[in-house]
Amino acid sequence: MRLILLGPPGAGKGTQAQRLVQKYGIVQLSTGEMLRAAVAAQTPVGLQAKDIMASGSLVPDEIVIGIISDRLDQPDMKNGFILDGFPRTVPQAAALDDLLKKKHIKLDAVIELRVNESALLNRVETRVAEMQARGEEVRIDDTPEVLSKRLASYRSMTEPLIHYYSERRKLATVDGMMTIEQVTREINRILTAVGAVEPKAVPARKARGAARKTAMPAGKKAAKTAKKAVKQARKAAKPASKAAKKVGKAGRRAASPVRGRGAGKAKKAAKKAVRKAAEKVTKKRAKR
Ligand code: AMP
């Protein structure tokens, strides 16, 4: 599976990517994470990116494209990957197209998580609180001020990718305001629809039931219909219980699959039973 998750900060890309990693054993490539690691390790890339990231702006395209290109060459990529936070600009998307073409890799889908902007600040605040509770270091760009800058970058630089991928028939949009579970389910549905994952296996009991249904012989089916007709006849003939009893007998005979009656015979018998019952009822009523 080769997938891109698209969405503003706080849309849930990281959470969903983690779930896909666990389910399918693929690799999550988050340029944000890689850049943070580079900053922490004080590599040349990290030193270049540090202040840009802290301000909420985007790191130059050539830096992130270089990081992704190297990463795609690693052996753990062979099972598939999820790109989270990359591409973020149209030039990055074009560069990714070239890279994938050269490496003979096909992209399965781009899933956009669409959320109300008003909910994002809340989500990021929750993320900060959770990280603090776990004793983790809080991201320096997770403040209301920097968040609004990151949102502005998303709108102007990243949102054009929605058009870019929808033109290439790769885009699927998911309502990111649903619960985490619902979003996961919807993503899995899309991945199945595009053939990126195998359809979920049907539980054995359900499968047996379905098989029995499809394997039901015509005679048996007709017998079921006949039973239904008998029930209806009984209802109609309620005041004339004797007649109803006869109908029941005839109907049961018609409905019995063990007697080996064929579809046509069973149906005919049931019809006859219904007709007779109705006639008896009418006659009795007329006598009264
Ligand atoms: P994220 O963890 O995806 O929110 O990214 C954190 C920060 O890393 C962003 O605000 C950018 O400064 C930088 N960054 C991550 N990915 C990219 C990218 N594809 N292009 C440019 N900058 C990026």
Image: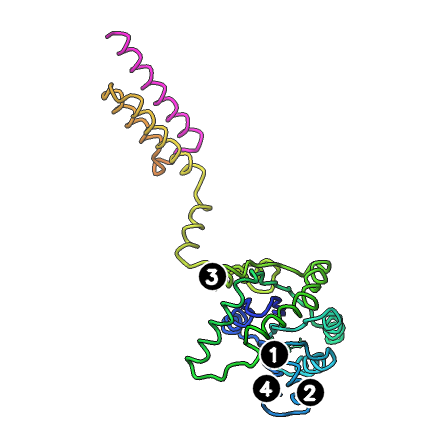
Rendered view: 114 above or below 135: above
- Pointer 3: residues within 10 angstroms few (<14), some, or many (20+)? few
Work out how far the residue at label 3 is from the one at label 1, CA to CA, in angstroms.
Answer: 24 Å
**Residue 270, position in %: x, y?**
37, 26
Work out how far the residue at label 3 is from the one at label 4, CA to CA, in angstroms.
Answer: 30 Å
Q: Which residue is mark 4?
A: 37
The answer to which image quadrant residue 29 occupies is bottom right
Q: Which residue is mark 3?
A: 179
Q: Nearer the viewer, residue 239 or 71?
A: 71
Colour mode?
A: rainbow
Q: Earlier in the sequence, mark 1 or mark 2?
A: 1
The answer to whether the residues at label 3 and label 4 have Cβ atoms under 8 Å apart is no
Residue type at mark 1 is Gly
- Pointer 4: residues within 10 angstroms few (<14), some, or many (20+)? few
Residue type at mark 4 is Ala
The local secondary structure at tag 4 comes to helix
Rendered view: 196 above or below 31: above
* Quadrant where the C terminus is found in the figure: top left
Examine the structure image and report whether residue 253 is included in the region drawn in magenta.
no
Magenta range is 261-288
* Quadrant where the N terminus is found in the figure: bottom right
> Which numbered disc, 3 or 2, marks the residue closer to the eye?
2
Residue type at mark 3 is Thr
Rendered view: 37 above or below 242: below
- Pointer 2: residues within 10 angstroms few (<14), some, or many (20+)? some
Q: Which residue is mark 1?
A: 32
The dot on residue 48 is 2
| Mark 1 CB near ligand 1 (8 Å cut) | yes
The local secondary structure at tag 3 comes to loop
Work out how far the residue at label 3 is from the one at label 2, CA to CA, in angstroms.
Answer: 37 Å
* Residue at 36% across, 19% down: 275
